[in-house]
Image (cartoon, rainbow, N blue to C red):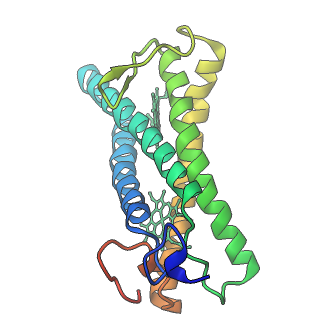
Amino acid sequence: MSAAGLTGQTADGWRYDGVARAFHWLVVAMLVVQYSVALLLASFLPKSAEEALANWHFAMGSSVCVVMLARLLWRLTHTPPPPPVDLSPGVRLLSRVTHWTFYAGFIVLPVLGWFAASAHGAQVKLAGLIPLPMLVPKDDPFGKAMQTVHPVIAVMLLALIALHIAGALYHAFIKRDGVVGRILPGRDAGVA
Ligand code: HEM
Ligand code: HEM
């Protein structure tokens, strides 16, 4: 099959298509903001600042969920470029599991956060605009459990992000096999 005949790839077939690359870096930018705000939330803040930051956290977090759902839809309907031929089966499996865990994780995590917020009695607005219903009543036991589980999963996903970036840096600076160029923005990133 010719590379140009595959959907979801550039004409030469070795890179992710423009939409997939745009989704990748949009989500990276959103998560940088999201984790930074979460870090601030964990520090001692005056009540008013805490409330404003929590609303930011709900707005950006719920947006991540929607963007990841759209990205998943795109991913399932567009063929990604084939993996580099010299990847060992173990590394290939690890990267596939990591990528699918990101999709599942950043869709489920915000929903667990929504349970946690509802158990606090806090109103969540999708993207800060559309009011969402309470998922559980205030002080609901499941919702309260999510106030512990949600941050734990968030930190686990952050560790996975560190592993993913370490893998990307290994490809860019040690293997120098062009894998990072597959996801970089720009018309032709060349070999990275
Ligand atoms: C990708 C999306 C998200 C990430 C990475 C994330 C990450 C985090 C992290 C790291 C914390 C711990 C901060 C701290 O200790 O204060 C946290 C707390 C929290 N998050 Fe999220 N979050 C996300 C989405 C959401 C959403 C969409 C909601 C609500 C709709 C939400 C609600 C909460 C609540 C209520 C807490 C405080 C839990 C508690 O201590 O009671 N999060 N989040
Ligand atoms: C918030 C942080 C990040 C998340 C959640 C994330 C998530 C993902 C996901 C889900 C994929 C798979 C795309 C698909 O096949 O559908 C991917 C691919 C990729 N990411 Fe990231 N990424 C992050 C940060 C980064 C950074 C900072 C770099 C570079 C330094 C990077 C480099 C790559 C590369 C090179 C690929 C393509 C791998 C391949 O061709 O098999 N990512 N990323």
Where residue 161 sits: x, y (%)?
Answer: 51, 60
Q: Is residue 23 left or right of residue 114?
A: left
Where residue 64 sits: x, y (%)?
Answer: 42, 42
Above or below: residue 192 compared with residue 151: below
Where residue 182 sits: x, y (%)?
Answer: 45, 77
Which residue is nearer to you in this view: 115 or 27? 27
Q: Is residue 67 left or right of residue 153?
A: left
Above or below: residue 123 compared with residue 82: above
Question: Which residue appears at 47% of the width and 87% of the height?
Answer: 178
Question: Which residue appears at 72% of the width and 70% of the height?
Answer: 93
Question: Which residue appears at 67% of the width and 61% of the height?
Answer: 97
Quadrant in the picture for the C terminus: bottom left
Above or below: residue 10 compared with residue 150: below
Q: How many marks?
A: 0
Quadrant in the picture for the N terminus: bottom right
Q: Quadrant of residue 100?
A: bottom right
Above or below: residue 184 compared with residue 63: below
